[in-house]
Amino acid sequence: MESTLIFKLKMSPEQIEKFQAFFMEKSGLVFEGRRIQEMESAIAQRLITLGISSFDDYYRRLASAPAASEELNHLALTLTVGETHFFRTPDQFAALRKYVLPELIERARPNGQELRLLSAGCATGEEAYTLCMILHELLPDFNAWKITIRACDINREFLAGARDGTYGERRVRLMDPVTRDRFLERRGKNQWAVKDFLARPIEWSHFNLNAEDYSPLSQGELFHLVLCRNVLIYFNLKNLSRVIERLHAIIHPGGYLMLGYSETLFKISEAFQSVHTPEAFFYQKTEKPLPPLPALPL
Ligand SMILES: C[S@@+](CC[C@H](N)C(=O)[O-])C[C@H]1O[C@@H](n2cnc3c(N)ncnc32)[C@H](O)[C@@H]1O
């Protein structure tokens, strides 16, 4: 019954444009190509749930609500796909373990043993926990280090899951049993919970990567490594360059940025240089300041 209703609710091209512009402005979410249909059916579902009879009425309700309204949160939840799991794309974590993290560790050893990492678009947290597991493996004296792993997402419900730290079998499927048993413990029949010591260095924060001001995220200090994997799909080209620019500004000179396996900065930003390893590639913030961009014609 419900699915037939959703099927019948179709937006006009003007309504599509209106919602596209709204999401772009309020949350930086971009709905183009096949994602337009996702947007349409998520909103149609909200109309049915709330008993609202037209897209225009719903638009008015959404547009007149405060920026952080519950309704916008609801939609962000439906419209952001949080697919993730521990050690997702193992080759990338192999490259981090073999090259990037040992290098950062050696650089940090004589400098206060401090490392700051960011998981941007962390979804339900597996990426941040995976980073922390690798650091525990690389640092036998982990507790003597000052490690901060900040993890942010626009979706509050994902963040609640991340804080809770309990996962089903599917999420741990890529872990070897020794690693799994060191860092997670069984909860019930098919659930795994993160052990307390693994969660300790992780700070979860609700943050929209489309924001202009990244200071709530960086809190005045730079990161040595930023993972922003499988998040670029949510931004259009213009927003994407801005997001990369802002991430660039909160990374240490010589620090690293890792995108998703199939994501690239080609034709998006020249602020980083790419570094290739047999397992994966990543980006490094060049030590030299970049030449200023040419002024845009008025
Ligand atoms: C597919 S998940 C990626 C999770 C993890 N990084 C990984 O690769 O396994 C994409 C995440 O990006 C988040 N996201 C989308 N737009 C965002 C924005 N503007 N600011 C912060 N997070 C955003 C979504 O909520 C979702 O949790």
Image (spheres, grey):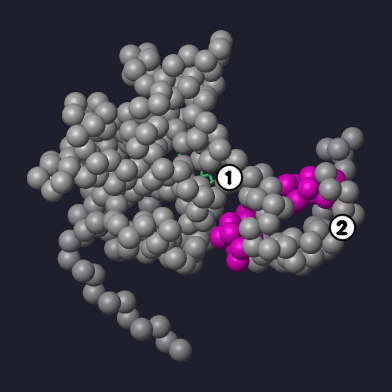
Residue 256 appears in view: no
**Residue 133 percent coordinates (x, y):** 32, 28
Left or right position of 44 against 293:
right
Q: Nearer the viewer, mark 1 or mark 2?
A: 1
Q: Residue 54 shows which numbered tag?
A: 2
- Check the image and report above or below for 207 versus 137: below
Residue 57 image position (x, y, % from top left): 84, 61
**Range shown magenta:** 23-48
Residue drawn at the location 50% of the way across and 61% of the way down: 210
Given the image, on which type of amino acid does mark 2 rest? Ser
The residue tagged 1 is 156
> Would residue 222 be counted in the magenta stretch?
no
Above or below: residue 233 compared with residue 84 = below
Q: Where is residue 215 drawn, in percent x and y? A: 40, 62
Furthest residue in direction top, as rendered: 189
Q: Residue at x 31, y 77 (%)?
A: 293
State whether residue 76 appears in this view.
yes
